[in-house]
Amino acid sequence: VQLVESGGGSVQPGGSLRLSCAASGSIFSINGMGWYRQAPGKQRELVAIRTSSNSTDYGDSVKGRFTISRVNNEYTVYLLMNDLKPEDTAVYYCNARGYESNWEAYNSWGPGTQVTVSS
């Protein structure tokens, strides 16, 4: 399963960005799809994830500012990021896990997209 991300870039503090991630391949199911991020010198951390049952989970630092949404029929997930802060600067990675059409489990990562928040 391949993931293609888009929507990263540079923005001033308080601004907004929307990230997109599209999955393709021999997908039978997507059990969870979402975003993680990694800042320089830090470990990768959860940003937001949405499951097939439409439950969501957010990292503590983004709750109330970021919103994840998913278009099931299109295997696409979006991350709307509002009120961005310099500490949100990181490479954002899309992640999807589930089963392929041959019943093999997958846990795929996108190449990452840079988000920079700076004045």
Image: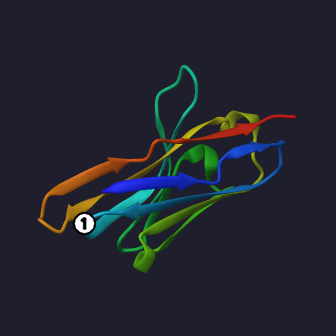
Q: Nearer the viewer, residue 111 or 50?
A: 111
**Outermost residue toward the right?**
119
Q: Quadrant of residue 82?
A: bottom right
- State the residue at coordinates (35%, 71%): 52
The residue at 20%/64% (across/down) is 100
Residue 5 x/y as whole percent: 52, 53
Up/down of 80 relative to 85, above or below: below
Q: Residue at x 40, y 62 (%)?
A: 23
Residue 37 percent coordinates (x, y): 53, 40
Q: Quadrant of the N terminus?
A: bottom left
> Would residue 98 be found to the left or right of residue 17 on screen?
left
Q: Which residue is mark 1?
A: 26
Residue 38: percent from left, percent from top: 53, 33
Quadrant of the rendered structure where residue 97 is? Answer: bottom left
Would you place residue 100 above or below residue 9 in this image?
below
Q: Could you classify mark 1 by the number of other residues whose Cα lies within 10 Å: few (under 14), some (14-19), or many (20 or more)?
A: few
Q: How is the image coloured?
A: rainbow
Q: Residue at x 84, y 42 (%)?
A: 12
Three-letter amino acid code at the position of disc 1? Ser
